Image (cartoon, coloured by chain):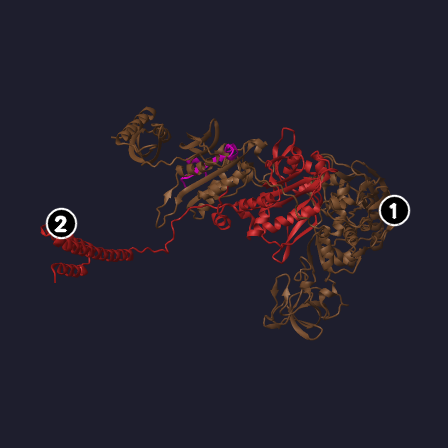
Amino acid sequence: MTQMEQLKRTFLKDLEGISTLQGIEDLRVKALGKKGDITLLMKDLGQKTPEERRTLGAELNALKDVLVTALEERKEILEEDSLKERLTSETLDVTLPPRPRTTGNIHPLSHVMDQAIHIFGQMGFVVAEGPDIEEDFYNFTALNFPPDHPARQEQDTFYLPSSSSTGQPLVLRTHTSPVQIRTMLKTQPPIRIIAPGRTYRSDYDATHTPMFHQIEGLVIDKHTHMGHLKGCLEEFCRLFFEDPSLKLRFRPGYFPFTEPSAEVDIWWKGSSWLEILGCGMVHPNVLRNCDIDPKEYQGFAFGMGLERIAMLKYGIEDLRLFFESDLRWLNHYGFAPEARE
Amino acid sequence: MRFTLSWLKEHLDTKASLEEISEKLTSLGLVVDKIKNPGEALTPFTICEIVEAEKHPNADRLQVCKVQTGSEVIQVVCGAKNARKGLKAVLARPGHIIPSTQQVLKVGKVRDVESFGMLCSSEELLLEEASEGIIEVDPKAPVGKSYAEWLELNDPLIEIEVTPNRGDCLSVHGVARDLAATGIGTLKPLKIAKVSGTFPCPLSLKVDLEACPYFTGRVIRGLKNGPSPEWLQKKLRAIGLRPISALVDITNFFTYDWGRPLHVFDADKIKGNLSVRLSKEGETFKALDEKIYTLSNEMTVIVDDSGVISLAGVMGGESTGCDETTQTVFLESAFFDPIHTSITGRALNIISDSRHRFERGVDPLSTLPGLEAATQMILDICGGEASQVLVEGQPPYEEMEIPFFTVRLETLGGLAIDPMEVEKILRSLGFKLIEDENGYSVIPPSWRFDITQEADLVEEILRIVGYDKIPSVPYGERPEQKPLAPAQERRFVIRDRLASQGLTEVITWSFMSKQEAKLFGGIDKHLILMNPLSQDLNGMRPNLLPNLLKAALQNQNRAAETIAFFEVGPQYANPTPEGQSLMATGLRCALFNQNTWCEKKRPVDIYDVKADALALFELTGLSPQVEASGPSWYHPGRSGTFKFGPQVVGYFGELHPRVLKAFDVKGPALAFEVFIDRLPQPKKKTMAKPKLELSPYQVVDRDFAFVVAQDVAADSLIKAVVKAEPSLKISLSIFDVFAMGEGKKSLALRIRIHPKDHTLTENEIQMISQKIISSVEKNVGGALRQ
């Protein structure tokens, strides 16, 4: 056996017994370090004949390659083992609750208002607004409520002590309908608006709160008739309640500001008709009050309670809790924020 | 409005089922509220006869009765004094539910004697509110038969909602007329009587026609008042009215049957003569409800020489009320106008069937026929003889012609209807038609106050045909536009931003109490409600925070520790539209977060709410200036004001300890307020963003600690650093703030220098650092910390 074979055999045998990276390094130095066995043999080459140098050199280089490869392989195995060992000791309890992210909730009424706006938006409606503190003229007179008419007193109105600059008594608007008047007085038909907002009536029990929300709709043009009113509200209700075959029932009703007037019921959960909104064709007197000629223009108006449709859609039972700011309720019935453009 | 099916059928000849009638009523706009069959709960109770009644061996007040049920004789223990042999009574058997208690009757032992049933009182069967003893059934009644059936209680009671414009349907006849127009039956005509008076009316009458345009009356003498006949009592009881006496019951009958309120005065109690006039301020009147009312001007009253004896159309007076001794009456039938009646009723807060009808309008042409028909009924029931009729004024009804183009049914109502059908409907509702060259004009009947123009006629026809016949037309052209203008959209964006910041949206009352608003600038006197629901909600809020603080307290009382609320809503500075500001107001209380395994809890602080508010200002694309200190409800040294130029756009900070104490909230409490409508709209959006230069050269980070005076704003230090070398971008973060005492503080900054076109040499870095130090020194008087 040549010296080189001897070296190779001893080296590989030693390598097998090594279990630490340090041991591998030590062995590398012993064979390939400055004073290592192979290095010394390389140095000896200088004293050999060119002939010997060529054959011996080639053999030595081959041996060196073998050793280096063996070292690396062994090193990789050891590294792999030690990584495995580390990983087994590094487990975490993945069932622990995650790092809390604090996100708040959107109130269900805002959510519903947003939905309603977008459904009507697809039908070409735009949002119009008016103040909460309203003049008697916009809230009643222009809407064809005659003075002292029982309908006027049925709306338990909140009054403020002073009058407007035009001498009108001031009230908290009892409905969003005054926005109809404000819009018609400053816009030429065609008009197609919705008006969501706060409304007030002096009534507080299980089914009434002194403040509530309505969404008003108004369309004025030359051709809109009751068929369009039905079509529009059917489309809205079916989209809003996410039921394409939802049944609606239109029945005669009474509002001073519409004629013909209708109440709309929806067939709810296959068991009963539930009233959800009032509507009708805009009363000719209302058009006249807004300087619009009823011989030329006509249209419809509707108004519905947002609390009502929110309660139906989301199965919310107690109206009063909408305004109690109870975190337990808000977390349960609220909605996660959405990114908006 | 309530009536029974059998009563309706006295006016409507129909074969329609109850269900069909109910559906028609609703589709006519006379919504059926409920239908109740009062006989239903009483069906099991049968008529029995007591064949033996003996004293209970162990109890003085009880009797042991043997009762014939119709099929057997059973033993029943009874405590009623009137239980006696031969009496026909109403029997409940074990297993039956007693209506008054809703308990199931069981076989029981009463003082050791077994009882196999119960003899019922009217009270137990809910037939009367209170009763003494057991029911004594007519001796002719058949034993074994259902008592309810014998009483004919199986007559459904129908309750409908009548809208304020349909006073004519506050009568059974009016309801029948509407139903007949739909074709499900035929309207039976009212029985019109004409009673010729046998003597002149002994009372003289003076009527101020301003107070009452049309008044009729007559005296009926020699009558005998007493309980009204069973048929009348039964009718009234069925609709929830208590029978009183024949005279009163007859007027109530006409109120419901015809929709024609009448009044009877005991004529022997009238002092002197009658007149109808407007009341004078301060007059008093004792009504039939035994209350004394003080009148104001302009109420229509009927007076005799003693003063006011009746509030016209609202309620009669006590002094001339009829009782069983009444022998002579003055019967009144008049037209009282809706507005006067409504004002009177509302001012005195009297609710009556009469007021309810007069304020909605009673058919003026029913005045005299109503008087005659009621006279006839009084004569039939009470006997006596009638005087001639006194009539003052004229029925206020003029025929009005409304031109009607039936094409409007289609162009306004969306439904084309056969003209023959239209005419038939109009006639059956009592309208007259006058043909002319264009079509025809329509004259509404005297009982329809609500029909004045074409649209009203369109509704009438559609109502009878049914709104369900109108085909629904899907919305045609849909202008493509966003429903929300950018400023409107912004409120929803703000909600989403704030919720993403960890705040939860609440919606609170627009009102609050004057007291609660005190620490927030108070409520303007023009914003105090004249008729608040309660003192807690008596004014329009000048600020949202008191409501948020109250909400915080309520939640803290329920053990909530991390409170982060916001509301997007109005606050009011004055009653004009401009005085209403839309706010985004937020409140954070106590802890920012709870202790968890991975994060330690910490209290909220001013920089949390500052971040909340700044998240909103980001929407404008501009950053506001921040000035130290805010309004009085904030801690003066721990609050700030946001401004765009001279315009205040918001506040933030720690709430004043005084506020915290007043609202009893566990602090710290931090708030922000942003005036949404004062935020400028971002400049016209271009899609393109500013060009980005990505430098390939290494950035340089250096840490500095500067010592500055305590009152130097961090913001000014930041500005001094950033502008130190204008040719390069310098960014920084403040990683430590430390108060050193003696009016000094130290701020530690990590400054990052972004090279532009070459890697910075050590020399250049030194020069820039030096520039930063001198800029800080020059601008804020700071020095490098040694």
Residue numbers of the magenta segment: B656-685
Query: What colour do you see for chain A?
Result: red
Indicate the secondary structure of the residue bearing disc 2. Answer: loop
What amino acid is at disc 2? Lys
What amino acid is at disc 1? Ser
Q: Which residue is mark 2?
A: A34
B701 vs B133, left or right, is left
What separation in Å lies between label 2 and label 1 (alpha carbons)?
Answer: 148 Å
Query: What colour do you see for chain B?
Result: brown
Residue at mark 2: chain: A
Answer with the quarter of the image where residue A27 lies. Answer: bottom left
Relative vertical location of residue B259 with respect to residue B37 in this rendering, above or below: above
- Residue A216 at x, y = what percent? 62, 42
Residue B670 is one of the magenta-drawn residues: yes
Question: Which residue is the extreme one toward the top?
Answer: B778
Q: Which residue is mark 1?
A: B387
